[in-house]
Amino acid sequence: MPAPNLPYPPSVDLARLPTPLEPLKRLSARLGAKILCKRDDLTGSALSGNKVRKLEFLLRDALDQGASSVITTGGEQSNHARATALAARQVGLGCHLLLRTGDPSSPPPAEANILLDRLAGAEISWISPAQYADRDALMAARAQHVATRQGSPCYVIPEGGSNALGAWGYVRCVEEIAAALGRVEATIVCATGSGGTVAGLIAGCKLLHLPYRVVGVAVCDDRAYFQQRISEILGVMSATYGVNVATPPEGIEIWQQYVGLGYAISRDEELACIRDLCRDEGLVTDPVYSGKALFGLLSELETKADLPQPIIFVHTGGIYGLFPKAGQLAPLL
């Protein structure tokens, strides 16, 4: 399907695109639904998943502004932070991370994503959950300190890369889906932890006039938070880039009932779902994002939810998040 000439901002070339759109044949047969997987775990850049689509735009902006480093934030095992640390090095930038942990005086060991942060030479500052509530102000202050020290800008990348600029990465993803499926009814399901991916998917569907239903599965916070956050991102996209993608909060579909025990905390039934998909399809999802979204999608289908088909499950990556769950997974194997 030919796409209109969309006003993409400048970007760097990091992701290996387009990612495959693969049928999940055995899972589809088991559930009686046509399910396809958009393999955004295969974007490249050291398995950086969905994050690198956003970083292509954000890191180009950092370079254009003369930055010599970037700063971002997330949880201690943040996929986004790790992706940023690695992608920044690919374009010659340093990286600073503010990572949330229960006790900053006793930070977690260098395993999984933290190990990769360290390998990339990221400068990590540990903050408490209470401090994390002020993360934007803390990042701004830290960026100013770093800029003074290094004599050049330190560019702030928001949590998850989720702003109007980063969301363009998922407009591009919708173009790829449309090229494979065409203008048919379909449902796109993905995890949402900071809102940028869902915002980009909604924007892409609007810009391409596609009849796709976009569903975000919350992995933290609640429906109202994500509806407001995503609506804000789309509003800024509309105003900044002159595109008609503004969407009121009530027009954004979020499933909040699968947060479970909370962000990055897994229930055994969620981990069993990850295990079963791997045994059905040889496909590995992570416990923080895609695994929770998968559990939500399968739960909906098992209760005979009326979702337009085909269903495109966007695999956002994050395989390294499995390793800290090894002890909890072991009895399920």
Image (cartoon, rainbow, N blue to C red):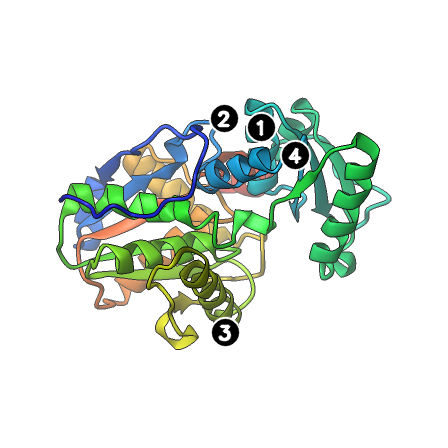
Quadrant of the image occupied by residue 61: top right
- SS of the residue under disc 1: helix
Look at 20% across and 46% down and name the residue there.
3
**Which amino acid, by three-letter code, is at mark 3?**
Ala
Residue 43 position within the rendered picture, expressed as x and y whole percent measured from the top left: 39, 32
Which of pointers 1 and 2 indicates the residue nearer the eye?
Answer: 1
Which residue is under mark 3? Answer: 224
Cα gap from disc 1 to disc 2, whole angstroms: 7 Å
Cα gap from disc 2 to disc 3, whole angstroms: 34 Å
Which residue is under mark 4? Answer: 67
Which of pointers 4 and 1 indicates the residue nearer the eye?
Answer: 4
Can you say which quadrant of the picture contains the N terminus? top left
**Which amino acid, by three-letter code, is at mark 1?**
Leu
Indicate which disc, 1 or 3, sits on the residue closer to the N terminus: 1
**Residue 273 seen in the current view:** no
Cα gap from disc 4 to disc 1, whole angstroms: 16 Å
Which residue is under mark 1? Answer: 86
In the shown orientation, is residue 32 left or right of residue 280? left
Label count reads: 4
- SS of the residue under disc 3: helix
**Which amino acid, by three-letter code, is at mark 4?**
Ala
Mark identifier at residue 116: none
